[in-house]
Amino acid sequence: MTGSAASADVAVVGGGPIGMGIAWRCAQRGLRTVLFDPAPGSGASSVAAGMLAPVAESHFGEAELTRLLVDSAARWPAFAAELTAVTGQDIGYRTDGTLVVTLTDDDRREAERLWAYQRSLELPITLLRATALRDREPALAPRVRGGALMPDDHQVDPRRLVAALDTALNRAGVTVVPKPVTELSTLDAEVVVVAAGYGSAALTGLPVRPVKGQILRLRAPAGSVGFKHVIRGYADSRHVYLVSRADGEVVVGATVEERGDTTVTAGAVLELLRAAADLLPEIAEYELVEARAAARPGTPDNAPLLGWYQPRIVGTSGGAGGRRVLVATGHHRHGIVLTPVTADLIAGLAAGGAPDPALALFEPGRFTTAMTPTAGEEDPWS
């Protein structure tokens, strides 16, 4: 439903999968819900690969975040099934698993350190020799030295996900208002949920920064991709992933750059394609159909901001007009995989529920210094 917003129980600011998922869950709880975004689904999710990778994305010093990733990944089968049942739309959810592969001895030693840490967290990993990897994926390069299978790391197509969530919002009676929000005090709702990606900084004063990612989309000849697993690789110290779709698309990504522009650079395209072709030589014959860049929302500790928050800086009004404010942002590389758990937990709070213990480590108030927008800084929601 698209139209003007009247008084609502919940106003969600931000129309990526996080904001759309929250709005859907709020409406399912009987809350009158309005979502504000000038172009839902046009942000980081339109560039994302859609890997649901609680194991492969587990990194040193992030054990608490890993637990949240595992929790959300476990919700994905039911979330995908429900969304498909409600909308009748295929969201590209696949459970083929992920292969992590290494090209050189140095690559293998780097990967083995991380695998040892991941196994210490009792995450499901099966180490494989090069021959076993090529038995699973014959298209892998002969130079591949070894790797690991992560069977619980799956994938979804983010663009199909956004389309299905849009349908679900319409059927749940959510009003979508296609305009930006620059001050929370202008919203007529009992609860405001800020899920505006890195634009949340200007609305809340929280330290959410843009982290640029460049990504490529290829198309296999005759629509026949020569591999089925998600391939994550170490190639001469370069990190790359390849995600195959059933329709013949292959997503190759992604850079991680501490900047907020969306320029696609020749150097990034070259490095991504070189690393990808070193691991899967056949992709050199694929058609390059798209090169895009977008900015993920990052935080100082790379973990999301989830829960109640009293904004210290909101536009020019200096506050949120007495409204209760929930924050759901800062998901960095994990926005797609964390969509189900974020939607469930934030909607539960909006409906008056007690905070889930899982939220304790991700409260927005853990940062004591608010980020003040610089005078004259471009408004990311304009």
Image (tube, rainbow, N blue to C red):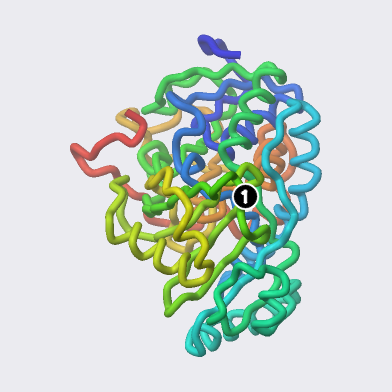
Q: Nearer the viewer, residue 188 or 337?
A: 337
Q: Residue at x 37, y 28 (%)?
A: 182
Specify whether 54 is left or right of 255.
Answer: right
Find residue 368 and report its horizontal and vertical position in percent.
42, 57
Q: From the viewer's perspective, tell me whether residue 222 is left or right of residue 287.
A: right
Q: Quadrant of residue 353?
A: top right
Mark 1: few, some, or many residues within 10 Å (few <14, many ≥20)?
A: some
* Location of residue 276 in the rendering, given as x and y in whole percent from the top left corner: 47, 65
Given residues 319 and 271, the one toward you in this image is 271
- Quarter of the image that includes the C terminus: top left
Give amino acid for label 1. Answer: Ser
Q: In the current view of this chain or complex, which residue is farthest to the left?
A: 376
Q: Residue 12: x and y, percent?
A: 55, 29
Q: Please name the residue that numbered disc 1 is placed on.
A: 224
Q: Residue at x 65, y 55 (%)?
A: 52
| Above or below for 281 versus 306 | below
